[in-house]
Amino acid sequence: MEYLKNKLVLALLAVVLSSCYEFEMRGFITSYESVNERFEQSAEWNQQNGFTEINIQENTYTIHAMGDSHIGSTDNLDIFFKQAKDKNATAVVLVGDITTGHEEDYETLKKHLPEKDSLMYFAVPGNHDLYFDGWESYYPIFGSSAYYFVVNTPQASDLFICLDTGGGTLGDKQLAWFKKLLETQRSNFRHCTVLTHNNIFRMHPTTSTNPMVEEIQVYIDLFTRHNVNCVVTAHDHTRNSDILGNTTHIIMDALQDSNNNASYLKLNVTETSVDFSFVEI
Amino acid sequence: MKYIVSIFLVLISFTGIVAQVQFQTYFDVGSNNVSEGTFIKNSYRGNYQHQKYSIESGLQFDWLSNNPNTLTGFDIIGSREFSIKNFPFNVKGFFMLNRFSDLAYETNWGIKAETRKLDHFTVILGTNFKSYKINFDAQEEYNISKSNSKLNENFNLVYRVSAYLKPHAHNWNIGLSITNIDYYVINQSTNPVFNIRGKYKVKPQLNLFMEAWYKQAGMLNINANYFGYFFRGGIKWNI
């Protein structure tokens, strides 16, 4: 019995210690900075830098998105950037958990990010990006974590809203901004896509956390009321999709090198719809 | 109001039989990241027990909130007591409706088992099946097909573990709970909520209770952030 107990303790210790590099126990209880503090910094950044508009000559275009690369290693991330360039993607979006939050991972990431004039990229933070005081490294690279960008085609303009759910909630300030954005701007655009790290729904039994149910209810109301076409998330590491109202909810596979089913998402935007497909690495 | 009176009258009408009827009402006052200020909710609940069987039902009203509905919650719970080798437990089947918007609502079906075998603890364990639904008016207004009006989340673990200072039967008590369920709210199992509860038996038939709930988004799971809190105060009356 004693032998078994010792083995169990050792096994538990091994699991805890091996996960310490990726998971920060402190983050499970409280974050280094609140989501409201990140939003205030983001709002300031948005005010200074404005929002990006991409003008293209075609009426149809593609946006590539990925999540959960958890670098470390960057093999799949490099492939993702290369294929986006080769396939003339209009932009790419990194939908959180790009790193494990360590400063050295951000240093690695910086070396692998493309030049913005060769490939326009956007990012939102995931929970892992914020561990180990990761926001301090994230902010100088990407700036705002709550913003939008616009793609102008000859026929119409499309709105892409990037939200920070790396802390498990939008927080009241970001939510108020998001709500106001939809109320005042949504009608000026043809399609509207939301990109954020945390999956909104639990489409299969999983331990990956979605927002508090009261917050999910607000999302459903807003997405329905403002005809949000597509919500792209990651976090769960396993692809899934479902439709509620006029909104398609997509969860992406992890792009992480160790994931045998690694893939990224291709959003195909046409005059009438935002369709999607997964591209296996 | 007519719903409350109806439930109350139905329960009272059964008291002639050897049975126990319980009535409970409470107020919730609090705030969270999505409430846009303070909310005040009020619930009325009735419980009728006959031998090993009981049926419980409740209604929730929002007196101050950003929800356009006033009647915002309804639930009904059917329960039976069991005992296996001196281990007593209740098995409860439940249905819950949450009317969180004028466009959509949420339903939950489920089953849970509850035991008070240990004098200082209550443990509840079960599963629920959640559906988010766009209501008929919103389907018409936003041109949503019926097949796209519902999204299901199946087999979600529900739990509550409570530890109390005094035995359950004591005339006052204080307890701590970790749970993902409340009367009209069921969170994902990985979103635990904490509460502290105090009760005081004013008379043999009348209990007062107070609760403080604290909600932290992503608690014990991701990069946790404050979500909200509320206080609950009410009475429980054994008729």
Image (cartoon, coloured by chain):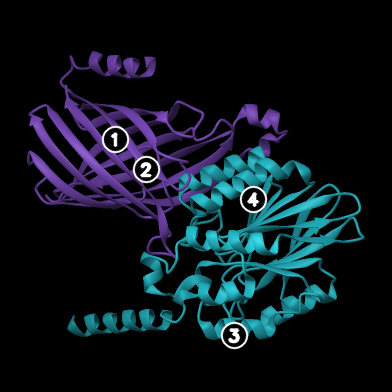
Relative depth, front residue between A64 and A156: A156
Q: Position of residue A175 (x, y in %)?
A: 55, 49
Alpha carbon separation for disc pair 4 and 3: 36 Å
Identity, as a three-letter code, of the amino acid under mark 3: Glu
Residue depth check, mark 3 versus mark 2: number of the one nearer the observer: 3
Alpha carbon separation for disc pair 3 and 2: 50 Å
Q: Position of residue B71 (x, y in %)?
A: 44, 26
Chain letter for mark 3: A
Identity, as a three-letter code, of the amino acid under mark 2: Ile
**In the rendered structure, are the residues bearing label 2 and label 1 in contact, judged by CB atoms less than 8 Å apart?**
no
Q: Colour of chain B?
A: purple
- Graded by Cα atoms within 10 Å as few (under 14), some (14 to 19) or many (20 or more), the crowding at tag 2 reads some
Chain letter for mark 1: B
Is disc 4 in the same subunit as disc 3? yes
- Graded by Cα atoms within 10 Å as few (under 14), some (14 to 19) or many (20 or more), the crowding at tag 1 reads many
Which label is found at residue A245? none
- The image quadrant that residue A106 belongs to is bottom right
SS state under label 1: strand
Residue depth check, mark 4 versus mark 3: number of the one nearer the observer: 3
**Residue at the outermost front position:** A48
Alpha carbon separation for disc pair 1 and 3: 58 Å
**In the rendered structure, are the residues bearing label 4 and label 2 in contact, judged by CB atoms less than 8 Å apart?**
no
Q: Along the horizontal axis of the image, is B57 left or right of A186? A: left
